[in-house]
Amino acid sequence: MSERTMHGILFDHARAARIGLPEAVFCEHKSRKALLSLLQGRGLDPAAPLLFTRLAPEIFHSLPPDLREKYCCDELARTAYAFTLPKKDKGRVAVVSAGTADGRVTWEAARTLDYLGIRREVYEDNGVAGLWRLASNLGEVNSFDVVIVVAGLDAALASVMGGLTGRPIFAVPTSVGYGMARAGEAALACMLVSCAPGIAVMNIDNGYGAACAAARVINLIGPPGNDPH
């Protein structure tokens, strides 16, 4: 039976059974009243952990102190959860960013992976203006099962990474950059026309989507001991 909240929100209860990923709450443009209802209710169910994305810090800080204390909130990533899914014993994801200016998207991806119970490591400041930084991390990055690449401006990091690893790559363009960067459109176009074959490109600033794409790959990995790498 369908169950609605007092604000007309209809949850997709069977999503995890269908695709292996639970529903999350996209907070942007939702009213404070609706978010308060969700944070006080469904968000506190340990049997069905819920991730809140694009949660504005001012909204979170306007909550009652006793409710805030129940959540693990990251203001940079604009994410919050009270509980996480069980830790997976298989699969790891490297989140590689061009710069700390891409931090919101980078950490949205990392925090989503934390919520999903997937082991991850973040490698920030690997922009191509100083290739030695990426080179120094490359051996470690190649030990992971999936790589998420986060970059704004010309987003060249995605192409460079695509030529240096055989791991699945999910590239996320960010809205970082001046003028002709056009709020991430230039980065998106550069990633889409990359000469490195097999790079999957997400929407602008969609770190959450990249983490979910990585999770789909991780969900296909066999039991420990059967690692094909």
Image (cartoon, grey):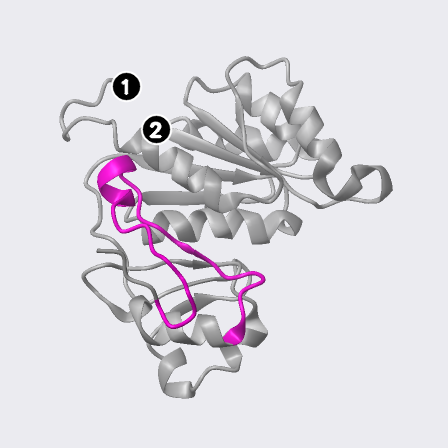
Residue 4 in the image, given as x and y percentages of width and height: 33, 64
Question: Which residue is at 31% across, 73% downward?
Answer: 41
Which numbered disc, 1 or 2, marks the residue that appears first in the sequence? 2
Q: Name the image quarter holding residue 135.
A: top right
Q: For the view shown, which residue lies furthest in the bottom direction?
A: 65
Given residues 228 and 143, the one toward you in this image is 228
Callout 1: helix, strand or loop? loop
Q: Is residue 178 above or below residue 32?
A: above
The numbered disc on residue 145 is 2
Q: CA distance from mark 1 to mark 2?
A: 9 Å
Let me know if residue 150 appears in the view. yes
Callout 2: helix, strand or loop? loop
Question: Which residue is at 63% across, 13% downward?
Answer: 195
Given residues 40 and 182, the one toward you in this image is 40
Q: Name the image quarter holding residue 172.
A: top right
Q: Is residue 178 magenta?
A: no
Given residues 179 and 8, the one toward you in this image is 8
What amino acid is found at the position of numbered circle 1 in the picture?
A: His
Task: Judge left or right: residue 142 versus residue 224.
Answer: right
> Which residues fall within the magenta stretch?
5-32
Question: Which residue is at 39% across, 34% downward?
Answer: 214
Let me know if residue 155 appears in the view. no
Residue on which disc 1 sits: 229
Task: Judge left or right: residue 84 versus residue 137.
Answer: left
Given residues 229 and 3, the one toward you in this image is 3
Q: Quadrant of the C terminus?
A: top left
Q: Residues within 10 Å of mark 1 (few under 14, many from 20)?
A: few
Q: Is residue 17 magenta?
A: yes
Residue 158 in the image, given as x and y percentages of width and height: 59, 27
Q: Is residue 49 above or below residue 151?
A: below
Q: Quadrant of the N terminus?
A: bottom left
